[in-house]
Amino acid sequence: MQQSLVLKQALSWKMNQSLHQSIEILQLSGIELYDYVQKIAEENPLIEDIRPIDRQVLSKFHDDTNAFENMNAWKKSMYEQLKENMYMLSIQEETIKEAVLFGIDSLNENGYLDITLEDWSAQCQLTMEETEQALFYLQSLEPPGIGARNLQECIRLQLREMDCDFPFLDDLFENNLILIADEDVGALAETYEITEEDAKRLITNMKLCHPNPGKLLEDTETEFIIPEASVFKEDGEWHLSFFHWSSPSIQIREDIMRMDMPKEGKEFLKEKKKELEMLEQAIQYRGKTLEQVLRIIVNKQLPFFEQGIAALQPLTLQDIADALDLHVSTISRAISHKYVQTDSGILQVKYLLQRETRKGEGVARIVVKQYVKEIIDKEDPTQPLSDEKIRRKLEELYQVRVARRTVMKYREELNIPSSSKRKRSTS
């Protein structure tokens, strides 16, 4: 209990008003930003007008993504949002799909799983291996941390998304969370024999974790999922073009500042002008940062736009942060709730970020995992392939070189049992 309390305390931080506004605006979508500015305009007489968003123009995106099945605004619960997002998981087996739906209904309001795997297995009449596979899919839903069985697993799932899933985390959670709470970089690095840079990264990323991910999906009015920008090919060249709603245009009433009025009125307008200047700076920072981030992503993922998922390139938040000399948390916020329009439909920007296999051969992990699953799906059920044979198949069929233990790791992450257990299940 004490460790959990320390962990929750470690996840909170303080910031000044200007920084808070910049961070808040950075992670808003274009439509959310427009609504945010509209609310400010109601209390700031200096804002004369905001360039309106043509909702009819937005409706043309209706057919571009499965998430657009209902275009009218409505209240959606956490459970409804998770079920709608299941299409992104591409679950083939109907029994597993039904099990994941059962798992979603078994979450509490904070997003934690409120049922044991044994009960889940019994209720859905599945084997434990199948139930673990359903758990894997459930925990793959957004936001990271959904489907966790305790606070430690919740934080670990989020850290895994940030490529910060160190092997010593279990010991850290059990014995040394005070190092995170105190931000003791030196002691953390020394205790777990990591670099101070990695220690700083871990401390920062743990602060970004949310202890109750279900709260991020509380009943909210949901309208359109629309793209910030379009990625398209023209005259043999790939281009990135931003839609006007990605950066609201604010018209200011300069005449009010020149009007005669009491001192109190002038002080009030002076304060409102400062607020407006901070708002404009935050919007400009958002636009500049988002454009820089998207250009790096698009340039890196050109093979994907040309050839599809098999050509998806390894790219992480840290890679982009290093390229732009920004903090990884800034990059994480910049791509939050952001979508781009492509020839393949509207994609979440986060989808275009994938970690590399450990050998660094230039293949995204998600691609190799898909290859592993395809190989196992096509194997002879009476003679299942060992991890070593799968490794050889990867090299033979896809020219992907990984270690046997990497195959084992990916297989386990997919909740696929070993060859001996797969063989027993068919006997």
Image (cartoon, grey):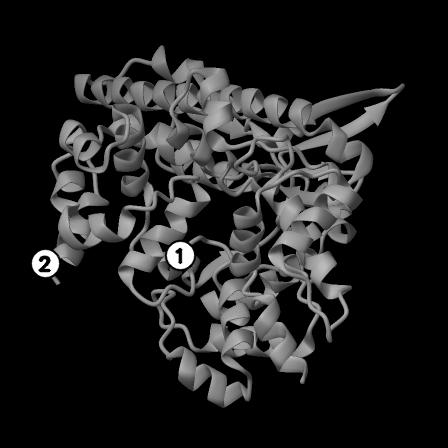
Q: Which residue lies at the image location 57% right of the left edge and 30% below the top edge? A: 360
Number of the label disc, if any, that sits on residue 145: 1
- Residue 372 vertical placement versus 11 (above, below): below
The quadrant of the picture occupied by the N terminus is: bottom left
Residue 374 position, x and y percent, is 73, 58
Secondary-structure class at tag 1:
loop
Which of disc 2 and disc 1 is earlier in sequence? 2
Tell whether 109 sits left or right of 291: left
Tell whether 105 sits left or right of 114: right
Residue 77 makes an appearance in the image: no
**How crowded is the residue under tag 2: few (<14 C-alpha within 10 Å), some, or many (20+)?**
few
The quadrant of the picture occupied by the C terminus is: bottom right
Question: What residue type is disc 2 on?
Answer: Gln
Which one is nearer the viewer's eye here, 297 or 130?
130
The quadrant in which residue 211 appears is bottom left
Q: Give the residue at mark 2.
A: 2
Residue 300 position, x and y percent, is 65, 25
**How crowded is the residue under tag 1: few (<14 C-alpha within 10 Å), some, or many (20+)?**
many
Q: Which residue lies at the image location 21% right of the left edge and 19% below the top edge? A: 267
Which one is nearer the viewer's eye here, 369 or 245?
369
Question: What residue type is disc 1 on?
Answer: Gly
Residue 22 makes an appearance in the image: yes
Q: How many marks?
A: 2
Q: Which residue lies at the image location 69% right of the left edge and 37% below the top edge? A: 312
View extreme (right): residue: 235
**Mark 1 and mark 2: Cα distance apart in space:** 21 Å
